């Protein structure tokens, strides 16, 4: 008996949907929670939908809900969200080489639809799959945006029927950023800057009595981290062996991509070929 096939015609949009599905499904519970918290902060379901589409950042939306519940000034909200979202400039730059030949309209759509999770999928696919195209990457972003926005809107509707303790906002926000910190720890320098920024955040928040203390701590810590890394790369003869840039432990499978393995295999084959040619040359010299 023939087995049923999900995608018998090999439709590309359906293949990309299958790749995006784990991410889309993972957005449902946290998207519902975010929608509920935004409703508790004063958003109706239409405003919740607009925020999820226009902002499309779980961290930013959780922060927005948290700051609104404590009646933070708009200036602090804008500054906090601005510096939080600046990381996308760095994330986008690492993908720029893959989409540099696309139109300005495409790049704009790609930029406004990118977030941490779909960036991770697209970066991995670009690095390991030679058939992965910019159009596929844009589809991943749109699938994740639709999933997140619908989950947010449904959460906003659910929030109108139930009541929650707003203290959960702080817990959810803390858990979210602890996860983000752990995922970004790659070397000793990032660990040290993380600890420094935590200490400075406490100091400046006590000093300023405002959330702006976190922004100040972030700027100072980032600047110090940049100075250290820039100095090490310029001065040290082997930067990757320097204490600051030494990598922290990571699972073995995340250390190299398929592209790295292919490059290693090519270098190994070239080395073996060179050795074989050298050996053959020595044999020919002896024969003469």
Image: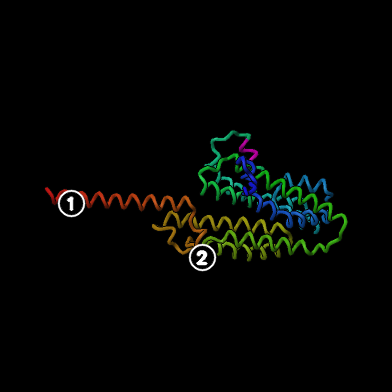
Crowding near pointer 1: few (<14 within 10 Å), some, many (20+)?
few
**Residue 221 belongs to the span the image colors magenta:** no
Magenta-drawn segment: 106-110
- Tell which residue pokes out farthest to the front in this image: 1
| Nearest to N terminus: mark 2 or mark 1 | 2
- Tell which residue pokes out farthest to the left in this image: 288
Residue 249, disc: 2
**Residue 109 belongs to the span the image colors magenta:** yes
243 relative to 112 in the view: left or right:
left
Q: Residue at x 61, y 55 (%)?
A: 219
Colour scheme in use: rainbow
Q: CA distance from mark 2 to mark 1?
A: 47 Å
Percent of width and height locating residue 195: 59, 65
Q: Give 209 or 192, whichever is nearer the viewer.
A: 192
Q: Are marks 2 and 1 in contact (CB under 8 Å)?
A: no
Q: Residue at x 63, y 34 (%)?
A: 105
Q: Residue at x 73, y 45 (%)?
A: 53
Q: From where the camera sits, is residue 80 visible?
A: no
Q: From where the camera sits, is residue 177 visible?
A: yes
Q: Secondary structure at mark 2?
A: loop
Percent of width and height locating residue 280: 21, 50
Residue 51, disc: none
26 relative to 38 in the view: left or right:
left
Percent of width and height locating residue 230: 48, 54
Crowding near pointer 2: few (<14 within 10 Å), some, many (20+)?
few
Check disc 1 and report the residue beneath it: 283
Q: Give 270 or 234, whichever is nearer the viewer.
A: 270
Q: Residue at x 49, y 53 (%)?
A: 257
Q: Which mark's residue is nearer the viewer, 2 or 1?
A: 1
Q: Secondary structure at mark 1?
A: helix
Percent of width and height locating residue 22: 65, 53
């Amino acid at each position: 008996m023939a087995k049923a096939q999900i995608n018998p015609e090999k439709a590309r949009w359906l293949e990309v949907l299958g790749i995006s599905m784990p991410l889309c499904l993972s957005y449902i519970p946290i998207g519902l929670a975010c929608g509920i918290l935004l409703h508790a902060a004063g958003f109706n379901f239409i405003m919740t939908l607009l925020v999820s589409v226009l902002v499309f950042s779980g961290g930013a939306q959780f922060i927005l809900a948290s700051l609104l519940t404590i009646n933070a000034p708009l200036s602090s909200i804008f500054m906090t969200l601005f510096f939080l979202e600046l990381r996308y400039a760095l994330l986008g730059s690492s993908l720029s080489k893959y989409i540099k030949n696309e139109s300005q309209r495409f790049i704009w759509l790609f930029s406004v639809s990118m977030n941490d999770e779909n960036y991770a999928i697209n970066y991995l696919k670009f690095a390991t799959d030679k058939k992965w195209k910019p159009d596929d990457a844009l589809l991943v972003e749109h699938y994740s945006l639709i999933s997140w926005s619908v989950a947010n809107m449904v959460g906003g509707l659910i929030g109108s029927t139930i009541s929650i303790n707003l203290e959960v906002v702080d817990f959810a926000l803390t858990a979210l950023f602890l996860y983000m910190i752990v995922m970004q720890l790659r070397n000793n320098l990032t660990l040290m800057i993380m600890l420094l920024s935590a200490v400075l955040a406490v100091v400046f928040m006590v000093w300023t009595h405002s959330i702006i203390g976190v922004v100040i701590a972030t700027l100072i810590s980032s600047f110090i981290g940049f100075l250290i890394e820039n100095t090490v790369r310029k001065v040290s003869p082997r930067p990757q062996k320097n204490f600051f840039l030494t990598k922290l432990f990571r699972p073995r499978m995340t250390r190299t991509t398929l592209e790295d393995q292919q490059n290693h295999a090519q270098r190994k084959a070239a080395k073996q070929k060179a050795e074989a040619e050298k050996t053959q040359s020595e044999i020919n010299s002896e024969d003469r």
